[in-house]
Image (cartoon, helix red, strand yellow):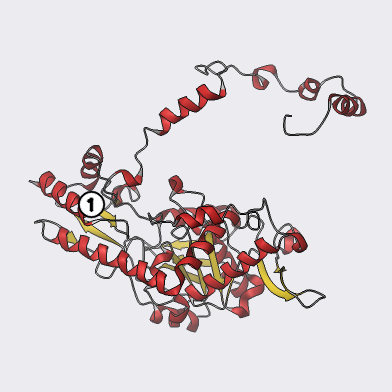
Amino acid sequence: MRYLAHTSARRKEILETIGISCVDDLFKDVAASVLNPSIEGLPDYQSEWAVEQHFRKLANQNRNASDGPFFIGGGIYRHHIPAAVDHLIQRGEFLTSYTPYQPEISQGTLQYLFEFQTQVAELTGMDIANASLYDGATSMVEAIMMAQRITGRKKSIISGGVHPHYTETAQTYAKFGGFSLECLRPNTTDLTLTPETACVVIQYPNFFGEVNDFRELAKACHDNGSLLVVVITEIMSLGLLEAPGNLGADIVVGEGQSLGNGMNFGGPTLGLFACREKNIRQMPGRIVGETVDRDGKRGWVLTLSTREQHIRREKATSNICTNSGLCVLGFTIHLSLLGAVGLERVAKLNHAQTVKLRGELLKIPGIKVITKNFFNEFTIELPVAAEPFVEALAKDGILAGIPLSRLYPGQFSNQLLLNATELTSDEDIAALSLALCSYLS
């Protein structure tokens, strides 16, 4: 109880009030074998310093992304984060512990959330954005459930180009949430809309790196009374690509990790969520709005927050959503530092290095580039199995991408997903090309 400000006298008073003599009496109904099980191999107590040393040794076994050539993407991306981001997110005006329920003492938090919403709305080409959700995968599922509320339908179609982890997350929700999903096979574009279709979910660029124009699909969805949900896993791509809202998307969701947040072994990250203004009251999460106080001074408050802590559970738009506040702050500061011009410049650097990587790989006999239109990620086909190749190069310090067979067991055994960003150097590309030539020779 080291973090609770209870004195010995106070604890004694509490125990007497509830009628027990010691804390152990609270657990007397729990079997001893369960309460204090012996754990084989668990070491004895050690000092804090010794424990730190032990975990430091374990951590040193990890391969850092900056330790050598790195071409892994697939939903989490390596980008440069300015030192100013880490410095600013720790300032007291912004760094608070939880949700800003009391606006009079949370103006700093509310202001950056308001700015974040504006940034996401402008990036996605949508009318309104919320103050973030947990991550990209859960944001996608929230969009599916939102589409069902709007249309009154219970069936949704997920494109074969959506990240398989996102699809698996949706399948878990569907199993217990009482709605049905049609999950198309990878790279499948043919789909059939029916009067029961609430929405169609696509990814842009898709998981394999392909950038597609989906305006015709959007029209078909709207003619059918369905919504189009667009998922973005690489938010940096919107520095160059047309905003999905301008192409007909009804809901845009995604992952914001690329701005202001490291890869962090896959998390924590932040979910993006934006939609049309007409559907604002069906959007999950919370929205920060601008107002004025009684003295006429500019201020911010939570204007819409129809979630579990603010409304009766049965009326809440979502019962398990919240925003990743610190991750959002990093995103907001990073994008503010870049500005529109800076974001476009970094996006162009990403694309240029990816084009260079593609060009070098095409010089190698037997390599086939499958992705035709891409931003900073594409799929290639090797003349050999991709997984053993990746494992072999990893031993030499080169992380050569994601073998698709890891995510699609029994399929795409020779295909490899590669990513390049502004941090991918010409030397990195040369090292991968040389290693690939050597492996195939």
Task: Give how far across and how far down residue 31 sits, in percent.
Answer: 70, 19
- The answer to whether residue 226 is above or below residue 313 is below
Residue 352 falls in image quadrant = bottom left
Residue 243 can be seen in this image: yes
Q: Which residue is drawn at 41% across and 69% down?
A: 343
Q: Name the residue under label 1.
A: 428
Instruction: Please state, as top left, top right, bottom left or bottom right, where the N terminus lies in the image.
Output: top right
Tell me what residue is drawn at x 23 percent, y 66 percent.
355
Q: Residue drawn at (63%, 74%), measured in percent from left and top?
A: 280
The amino acid beneath tag 1 is Asp
Q: Is residue 205 left or right of residue 17?
A: left
Q: Quadrant of residue 308?
A: bottom right
Can residue 140 be spotted in the picture?
Answer: no
Residue at position x 24%, y 69% from top?
Answer: 372
Q: Is disc 1 surrounded by few (<14), some (14 to 19) or many (20+) residues within 10 Å?
A: some
Residue 49, image x, y percentages: 53, 24
